[in-house]
């Protein structure tokens, strides 16, 4: 997964990975990637959400 989503799992983006744990078990991981987008000369900051993984036990 790290190869397919290199920007998401880059060390610089580690603060933007949301993790939910229960009793020491990883339940869910949600990756967020902040980037700048330009639309007709206007720059806006956007957040992409990806790589949402939830253990079947917690679904």
Image: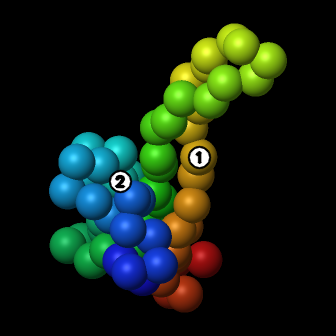
Q: Position of residue 29 (x, y in %)?
A: 42, 65
Judge by depth and name the residue closer to the eye, 4 or 32. Answer: 4
Q: Residues within 10 Å of mark 2 (few under 14, many from 20)?
A: some
* In this view, 46 is above or below 17: above
Judge by depth and name the residue closer to the eye, 26 or 43. Answer: 43
Dot label at residue 11: none
Q: Is residue 42 left or right of residue 12?
A: right
Dot label at residue 17: 2
Name the outermost residue toward the front. Answer: 41
Q: Gap between marks 1 and 2, in whole Å?
A: 12 Å
Helix, strand or loop at label 2? It is: strand
Residue at x 67%, y 24% (from the top left corner):
38
Q: Position of residue 50 (x, y in %)?
A: 57, 60
Helix, strand or loop at label 1? It is: strand
Which residue is denoted by mark 1 in the rendering? 48
Which quadrant of the figure has residue 11?
Answer: bottom left
Judge by depth and name the residue closer to the eye, 39 or 30. Answer: 39
Name the outermost residue toward the bottom. Answer: 56
Q: Quadrant of the C terminus?
A: bottom right
Q: Quadrant of the N terminus?
A: bottom left
Residue at x 38%, y 80% (from the top left corner):
3
* Sequence order check, earlier mark of 1 and 2: 2
Q: Position of residue 55 (x, y in %)?
A: 48, 83
Q: Residues within 10 Å of mark 1 (few under 14, many from 20)?
A: few
Residue at x 20%, y 73% (from the top left corner):
24
Is residue 45 in view? yes
* In this view, 14 is above or below 23: above
């Amino acid at each position: 997964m790290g190869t397919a989503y290199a920007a998401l799992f880059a060390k610089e983006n580690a603060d933007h990975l949301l993790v939910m744990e229960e009793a020491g078990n990883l339940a869910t991981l949600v990756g967020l990637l902040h980037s700048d987008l330009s639309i007709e000369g206007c720059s806006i900051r956007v957040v992409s959400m990806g790589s949402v993984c939830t253990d079947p036990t917690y679904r």
